[in-house]
Amino acid sequence: MKLLEGKTALITGAARGIGKAIALRYAQEGCNIAFTDLACNEASQATEKEIAAYGVKVKMYASNAANYEETQNVVAEIAKDFGRIDILVNNAGITKDGALKRMTEEQWDAVIAVNLKSVFNFTKAVQPVMWKQASGSIINMSSVVGVSGNANQANYGASKAGILGFTKSVAKEFGVRGIRSNAVAPGFIITEMTGVLPDDVKKEWEAKIPLKRGGTPEDVANTCVYLGSDLSSYVTGQTINVCGGMLM
């Protein structure tokens, strides 16, 4: 029996990177996949094909996660197309790093909107669906930067720390209906975004990690399989650091 057989997951920002890895792992475990990204393009179409190869139902939806109205509409469409939503993975995120003294209001607002407001948007939109089902698992993608902070990432750190407070509040509010809410805080994960860093910077990061390597998107995806499945049925309001021991 596959761990997510018969379930439907909604994953935001899943055309590439960690979101894509989660979608593919979920599909391997028999999960139907609705995923969003900013636009329908070659990357999102290629991801859709890769997911479909596992024999599950899949559909991509173009949606700006930071836009409240668009989110309400796309979740209504997904609920209609799939009939249910068992797992929500709030993964959409951006960075606009820089020293606080040079950070613009636009850089601050954009990161808060995409990283934090999107979590509110999607969680609020799926609540009636999960409430009716009296079940559901909400997984919010935070970061070790949200747990411990990082220089030149005040906007990103604030957005990812906000996710942690939101996750715990929702866990306390939704638990009465059997709906769980947890956060995942990835550490140094090798993706397209971090892959372009110079080798000496990567080695510097890896030296701080007890496991002496950067993580993979699949490392994060495996934790999300656990949180999305019934294996974690008594786990809610928690933050799991997937960081090779960087934070303890």
Image: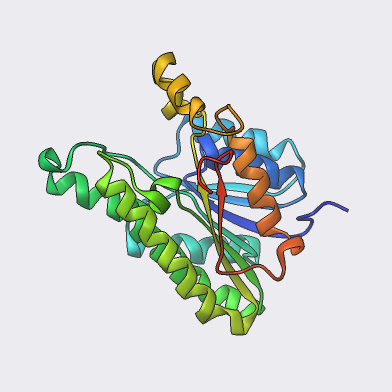
Q: How many marks?
A: 0
User: How far across and how far down the image is residue 29, in percent?
Assistant: 77, 48
Q: Nearer the viewer, residue 196 or 81?
A: 196
The answer to whether residue 160 is above or below residue 151 is below
Q: Residue furthest right?
A: 1
Residue name at image x 50 percent, y 25 percent: 207
Q: Is residue 102 left or right of residue 112?
A: left
Residue 160, how many percent across, how many down?
38, 53
* Residue 220: quadrant of the picture: top right
For image coordinates 65% across by 49% down, the residue present is 223
What colouring method underlies this structural image? Answer: rainbow
Q: Is residue 117 above or below residue 203?
A: below
Residue drawn at x 47%, y 45% is: 13
In front: 43, or 90? 90
Q: Is residue 72 visible?
A: no
The image position of residue 47, as x and y in percent, is: 58, 35
Residue closest to the far top: 199
What percent of the width, then of the height, locates residue 101?
A: 11, 41
Q: Is residue 85 left or right of residue 150?
A: right
